[in-house]
Amino acid sequence: MTARDILHKMKVKAGFSSAPPDTGKGKGKVSKHITHGFHLLKGKANHPMEDCLVSHFKQIDDKELGLFAIFDGHMGHDVANYLQTHLFDNILKEPEFWSEPVSAIRKAYDNTDAEILSKVNVLGKGGSTAVTAILLNGQTLFVANVGDSRAVICKNGEAIQLSVDHDPGTEKKEIEDKGGFVSNIPGDVPRVDGQLAVARAFGDKSLKIHLSSEPHVEEVKIDDTTEFLILASDGLWKVMSNKEAVDSIKHINDAQLAAKHLTEAAVTRKSKDDISCIVVRFQ
């Protein structure tokens, strides 16, 4: 972690609601043709920035991992910050990660949620959605998510959603089977027990008996038709379709500028939420 990253985390931890946009870029050392860029923008809500992200490459022995994630906190940013520093470590600590990565990701999501719930006195009763992407040797992509932060890949010019928006209306039966309910008040979105607008999340101890943290996981092969990947919080997706997002950055070769363009486009479309975005370019 760079000094700049540490300074930014200190500002967020201190609760500075006027923290400036955070932006950056990088590329793989082995897969030098793969670049990534990110941009975060504080929304208009009267609370500290609740989004955070991970966007970097990591070398482990002879393997190179691209680690990319968006964490969108609610009722505070402590759970999102915890995920930022612990989730990938927990995934990579799973013994079967190299042989059964999908299983390892599922186990690590579950174990990390248990850690967060056990630390409620420190982290509070809030929670966070998550979308994570692990790029193995520039060839295979593993995407997982809980909640409504989303992953969209562009292949052959087409937008393909790799994540699932875990909407309480869609998962109403599962929630009711656990003894919960889904409110559907006119003018509002469906909410678990009348509170949370996503059916799956990390944390949220008071709702956990009715709330899942089981991730949706996808494995994707990267080939010559794969152009770029977008990860973003719902501050973007509330105002922009998958196709609109892909089409708007098709001709922006700089991944950082592409991520910045998407966040600014969301603001132009009147998004008031925190917005965080990562773009990974494969070509």
Image (spheres, rainbow, N blue to C red):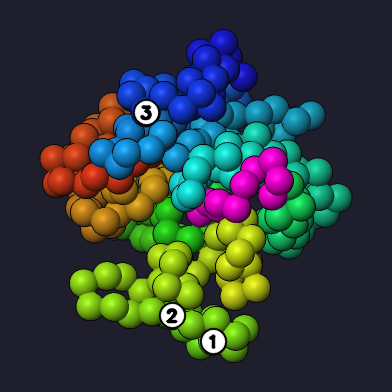
Going from N to C along the chain, the mark reached first, 1 or 3, is: 3
Q: Secondary structure at mark 2?
A: strand
Q: Secondary structure at mark 3?
A: loop
| Residue at x 48% of width, y 61% of height | 147
**113 to 261, vertically: above or below:** below
Going from N to C along the chain, the mark reached first, 3 or 2, is: 3
The crowd level at tag 2 (other Cα within 10 Å; few <14, some 14-19, many 20+) is many
How far from the left and from the top, in percent, is residue 160? 36, 60
**36 to 50, vertically: above or below:** above
Label 1 to label 3: alpha-carbon separation: 37 Å
* Residues marked 1 and 2 touching at CB (< 8 Å): yes
Residue 95 located left or right of residue 144: right
The crowd level at tag 3 (other Cα within 10 Å; few <14, some 14-19, many 20+) is some
The residue that disc 1 covers is 176
In depth, the one of 145 and 82 nearer the eye is 82
Label 1 to label 2: alpha-carbon separation: 8 Å
Confirm whether residue 211 shows in the render.
yes
How far from the left and from the top, in percent, is residue 146? 53, 60
**Residue bounds of the magenta highlight:** 120-131
Total label count? Answer: 3
Q: Amino acid at mark 3?
A: Ser
Going from N to C along the chain, the mark reached first, 1 or 2, is: 1
Q: Quadrant of residue 16?
A: top left
Q: Which mark is residue 17?
A: 3
Residue 225 inside the magenta-drawn segment: no
In depth, the one of 60 and 268 nearer the eye is 268
Q: Amino acid at mark 1?
A: Glu
Q: Which mark is residue 182?
A: 2
Label 3 to label 2: alpha-carbon separation: 32 Å
Q: Amino acid at mark 2?
A: Val
Q: Quadrant of the N terminus?
A: top right
